[in-house]
Image (spheres, rainbow, N blue to C red):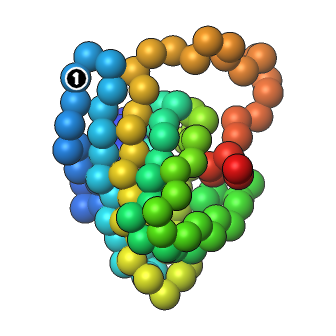
Amino acid sequence: MQSDPVVTNPQFYRVIFENERVRVLEYLDRPGDESTPHRHPDSVMFTLTAFRRRLSSGGRFIDVDLPEGVARWLPAQEHSGANTGETDTHTIFVELKEPAPHPLPAGAPEQLGPVPD
């Protein structure tokens, strides 16, 4: 299964910079839009607008409500998302290409959504 968000959801994601260490994605959607399942490596997410979303993966879900102008750590994860708010979602993802220094133990569930501060 192809899980690169730029391939699975090109209507929402675009690459705005890439080199051998990072890839920077811009994400933009409207209220009611839904993405198909895709995978993110460890990333930093910066919100350009305030938004509400529901992220889903493997029967689990989390509602995310973030203000404009915040940075959040997004651990590697696979999910799909739905804009459940009344505003466009506009974010920047800085995806790391280096492997995590401490991978999850076998069988441990992945974090879903950004890590709260």
> Can the viewer see residue 34 in this picture?
no
Which residue appears at 25% of the width and 61% of the height?
11
Where 98 sits versus 27, above or below? above
Q: Answer left or right for 75 relative to 19.
A: right
Where 53 sits versus 93, above or below? below
Q: Position of residue 80 (x, y in %)?
A: 52, 55
* Element on which disc 1 rests: loop
Q: Position of residue 92 (x, y in %)?
A: 36, 51
Q: Quadrant of the N terminus?
A: top left
| Residue 61, quarter of picture | bottom right
Q: Position of residue 114 (x, y in %)?
A: 62, 49
Which residue appears at 76% of the width and 17% of the height?
106
Q: Position of residue 105 (x, y in %)?
A: 77, 17
> Can the viewer see residue 31 in this picture?
yes
Residue 117 versus residue 43: which sits nearer the camera?
117
Where 32 sits versus 34, above or below? below
Residue 57 versus residue 65: which sits nearer the camera?
65
Please name the residue that numbered disc 1 is placed on: 19
Which residue appears at 42% of the width and 26% of the height?
96
Check disc 1 and give the amino acid type: Asn
Where 88 sits versus 81, above or below? below
Q: Answer left or right for 58 relative to 34.
A: right
Which residue appears at 30% of the width and 45% of the height?
25
Crowding near the residue tagged with mark 1, few <14, some 14–19, many ≥20 C-alpha atoms within 10 Å: few
| Residue 111, quarter of picture | top right
Find the residue positioned furthest to the front.
69
